Amino acid sequence: MPSKEVNPDLLKERQTATFDPHEFSVFWAGGEERYKEKKSLEKIFLEDPELKDDLPISYMSHKELYEHSLRKACIIGEKIRKLRADGEDGVDTYNALLGGSLGAAILKEGNPLSLHYVMFVPTIMGQGTMDQQVEWLSKAWDCEIIGTYAQTELGHGTFLRGLETRADYDARTQEFVINTPSLSAYKWWPGGLGHTANHAVVVAQLYTKGEFRGLAPFIVQLRHSDTHKPLPGIDIGDIGTKLGMKSVNNGYLGLKNVRVPLNNMLMKNQQVLPDGTYVAPKNSVLTYGTMMFVRCALIRDTALSLAKASTIATRYAAVRRQSPIDPNQPEPQIMDHTTQQLKLFPQIAKSIVFKTTGDGIWNMYNVLSGEIEQGNLDRLPEMHALSCCLKAICSADAAAGVETCRLSCGGHGYMDCSNFPTIYGMTTAVCTYEGENTVMLLQTARYLVKVYGQALNGEKLVPTVAYINDALREREFVNFDGSLESIVKAFQFVAANKIRIAYEQIEQRRKQGHSTETAANLSGTFLTAAADLHGRAFLAESAYKELLAVSRQVSPALADVLKVVLELYLVDACLNRIGDFLRFINITDKDVTTLEIRLQNCLRQLRPNAVTLVDSFDLHDRVLDSVLGAYDGNVYERIFESTKKNPLNKEPVNEAFHKYLKPFMKAHL
């Protein structure tokens, strides 16, 4: 067992911090009340011996891992039932257990029941009528039925109009007949579909009276409620091992003449009457509400991934000593190397910015949901565009950041027991699910080009794109003085010009005779670049407003640290896009050098507080699950202890020696 004493290097780092880590932890949790709830949930779930792993899951087979994970998922579900009975099952509880740190601690490779809570239930709530909610929600909340969300197909993902699954309405029996007419039409990827769920929301192309009506969601029973055997016409199973999310039980689904009652089509936004008459939705975007909800939630998940990775790597960098800076001095902590700081500290800053931005987006979504309920759809396109590009940018940056943190730990970061492989697998998955990132950027760009045209016509734009109006008025960006406010304004000016270029590229190709769709395809790289800069401009503005606002509410000591974090984030973000800045803004060689020196100064200022800052994320050792990142810093003892859990080391001579190696060695005698 590792020593109970804390590594002296880590102890020293904590003693020299300039701020109170508890104060930051409370801010990070969302306030004192949520911090207490977090600690209470950790006690309930992390101290339960039934939810601990005796054998590291990396040594389990795919089948063993699923069975092990489902057992724990059911224990979690039972505990949630008890919390609900006691009136203690708030949204934060579900967030923590399904997409947050607590769930990741218990089920490292994902929860086979997660889509039941994250997509099946919200889809019924968001797209079901009141009567349908009464019929289905209580069963779903009580887990009398287990559901998933089956939209993506083997042959089509983000391009929803290309889905092949078809639902034909039979007015004679008042039923829908659902089919997957080809192999590529098979539903592919839904979590829990393989062997866990017995129901699914199946998204299909709707036909009534022989006419195509668009996409519609249907509740389909997949398995018998008692035997769990697939029902007639259902071909179903698990799709196999993956890079990450290995215990989510992603599945495939084929349907052959599966009949469901008329009322099994979720009809809050669109209806089919008993005689087959179709009533269209007021706005087609309403049918995509579930995906927008999940994309907003994912932004905060990426912050957690970066927080975990940067905590592990920063603690390791304080303990690991290597490569003398001064040949006459002992080997320093590797965190004293400026190059190491440049790997780690921007990831810490991004995790904080993504968290504060994610909280803001979540609040925006909740406000928008209220407006939609009142029939006000004005800001729905804006929210859709913003959630798309932020999901893409934050997931891509987080995946790259986790990999940077792994690389910063050298060879030890390559070991499974570092937990970097699992964190990376879970993080990079976000780059493709709920919309592949390039497609997400293109969806945002389509909106941006549209609003740029509106701006040219003199229309006033909604807040998140209002900077386009400003850029059209000012034409040139003057007086870049390097201040944080100036960097934010410069990001917006650069984004506006990238949008202008994308708009002009499309218009130029249309004048050459291309259709709008072909012109957009030929301009694709301009469009994705515009959407990327739009998202980064929003992140810059959000970081500036949110962190300065927080700085005014906390102690001066913590405020000073947060201001360094803000400056580091903005300067680093600017330097990472310096080519675009030089293209559209009059920035000199001296200005760039000044920014580079400021970046170095930010690293130097953050160095004394780096360990305490990641400590303040308040990530339990079970959440990190890393021999490199434990709170006590006893890295080498924990690495060696992990080897003792390896089944290969349970016997001095493996049977493969007698079967294969010994005969091979003796064959020439």
Image: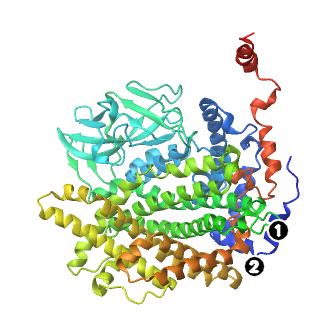
Instruction: Pinpoint residue 216: horizontal percent, then vertical percent.
Output: 31, 46
Instruction: Pinpoint residue 637: horizontal percent, then vertical percent.
Output: 83, 49
Instruction: Pinpoint residue 381: horizontal percent, then vertical percent.
Output: 32, 65
Furthest residue to the top?
669
The residue drawn where x is 63% and y is 33% is: 67
Label placed on residue 329:
1
Instruction: Pinpoint residue 634: horizontal percent, then vertical percent.
Output: 82, 54
User: Hey, which quadrant is residue 478 in on the image?
Assistant: bottom left
Q: Nearer the viewer, residue 104 or 212?
A: 104
Tell me how far mark 1 sits from mark 2, CA to CA: 27 Å
Which is nearer the N-term, disc 1 or disc 2? Answer: 2
Furthest residue to the bottom?
479
Image: 483 above or below 19? below
Q: Nearer the viewer, residue 25 or 2?
A: 2
Residue 95 visible: no
The residue drawn where x is 50% and y is 38% is: 250
User: Label 2's element?
Assistant: loop
Along the horizontal axis of the image, is 487 left or right of 638?
left
Looking at the picture, which amino acid does disc 1 mark?
Gln
Looking at the picture, which amino acid does disc 2 mark?
Thr
Q: Sort mark 2 into few (<14), some (14-19) or many (20+) by Cα contacts within 10 Å.
A: some
Along the horizontal axis of the image, is 541 left or right of 500?
right
User: Hey, which quadrant is residue 188 in on the image?
Assistant: top left
Q: Sort mark 1 into few (<14), some (14-19) or many (20+) by Cα contacts within 10 Å.
A: few
Quarter of the image containing the C terminus? top right
User: Label 1's element?
Assistant: loop
The residue drawn where x is 67% and y is 75% is: 606
Label placed on residue 18:
2
Label placed on residue 212:
none
